[in-house]
Amino acid sequence: MVWKSVASWLPLRKWTPGSIIVGGIASALAIKLAQHFHSRQNKRRFTEKDVVVITGCDSGLGYNMACICLQAGMTVIVTCLNRQTEGYINLNSQSGSSGRLHVIIMDLTARKSIEDAHNEIRQYFATAGTHARLYAIVNNAAVMCFGEAEWLTHELIETQINVNLAGTMFFTVPLLDMIREHLARIIVVTSHCSRQALPGLSVYSATKAGLRAWTNALRMELAPHGVPVVEFLPGSFLFHSNICARQMQFFEKMWQNMNDRQRIFYDDYFKRYRNYLEPLCQPRGAHIIAKNDPLVGCMQHVLFDQNAKELYKCEPWRYWVYYNAFRFVPALLRDKLVRKFIAMPEF
């Protein structure tokens, strides 16, 4: 038997825990080196003819992706929610000097705003003609709201659904003919919450799980046409983003919407919950993430890998340990692990 001959080559009795660990590390390093060499071999050069469209560039991932693409020599069309954000101000100040940056105001909760953005994008390509090629559409815009399901108002539920899920669909689908024509890649930023829903983020988790399902279906539909669809899980990036910057405003709306019985029942818990999140959910300026941050390298692979993978994950070791544990442990233990992972105040 082949397996017997293979087994005879391996001095299993001489293996020790130390040698197994060393072998594992050596194998991991070999894989990393091979991946690094492969990525260098497949690295391509970009010009201003390569156009990338990125939503949600007021701060965080969108803002940094826009800067990365500009540094690569590409033309970048970004969307921002309004003209008051630091991301809009910084990017808009560059639009005149470089000629490769175009800023569009778009609200994913407003159908007319989405249609206006479509018109601006199509007008750009109609004017540029053969001097522009759509390289990628990056669906990054999102809003996150912490809070127990019973606390959430109709508006807070609807906003997350419209921005995170429906808005992404409404923005992308009308552009699919152009995406297919240019063989552009579609990048969809999801979340680890799409793999394991978290208490306190019920609606956010639901929207990201729905977005993941839509992305997978879209990938299979567009594969015959040569259009890559990429899912990007950025891991923990709360401190790089304003995704929950309005959380204190959301808490005010929740409290105002509660009836007297709910306020009495949740009073102490609600206050502890709010106080815990207040220092974590403050508005942050649009800043450039450090080059040595693993998130930057992952964003570059998502954007520039010549043969794009269907999934890219950037996760701290803590995420990796917990989310792998969530997959295999019994439900009762999993729920306890989830609560330990999020480390939020409990009732």
Image (tube, rainbow, N blue to C red):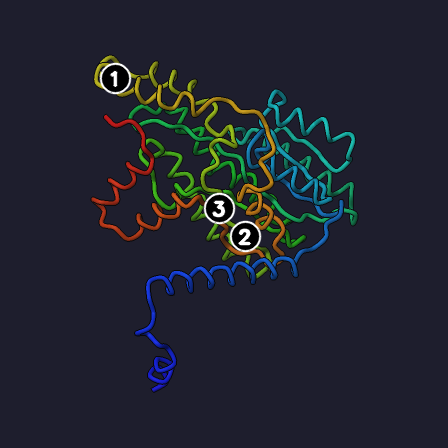
Marks 3 and 2, how far apart in space? 17 Å
Check if mark 1's residue and mark 3's residue have beta carbons within 8 Å. no
SS category of the residue bearing label 3: loop
Task: Give the amino acid type for the residue marked by disc 1 in the picture.
Answer: Asp
Left or right relative to 183: residue 253: left
Tell me if residue 137 comes above or below residue 43 in the rendering.
above
Picture residue at 53% right of the left edge, 56% below the top: 309
The residue labelled by disc 2 is: 229
Tell me if residue 307 comes above or below residue 258 in the rendering.
below
Picture residue at 36% right of the left edge, 48% below the top: 321
Marks 2 and 1, how far apart in space? 45 Å
Foreground: 97 or 202?
97
Question: Which mark identifies residue 268?
Answer: 1
Picture residue at 71% right of the left edge, 47% below the top: 50
Tell me if residue 326 comes above or below residue 166 in the rendering.
below
Left or right relative to 242: residue 83: right
Question: Which mark identifies residue 314?
Answer: 3
Marks 1 and 3, how far apart in space? 36 Å
Question: Where in the figure is residue 291, as x and y percent of width and height?
Answer: 60, 40
SS category of the residue bearing label 2: strand
Left or right relative to 44: residue 80: left
Q: Residue furthest bottom?
A: 1
- Between marks 3 and 2 in the image, the one whose residue lies nearer the viewer: 3
Question: Where in the figure is residue 175, as x and y percent of width and height?
Answer: 61, 44
Occupied quadrant, residue 72 = top right
Check if mark 3's residue and mark 2's residue have beta carbons within 8 Å. no
Q: For label 1, count other residues whose C-alpha is less than 10 Å away and answer few (under 14), some (14-19) or many (20+).
A: few
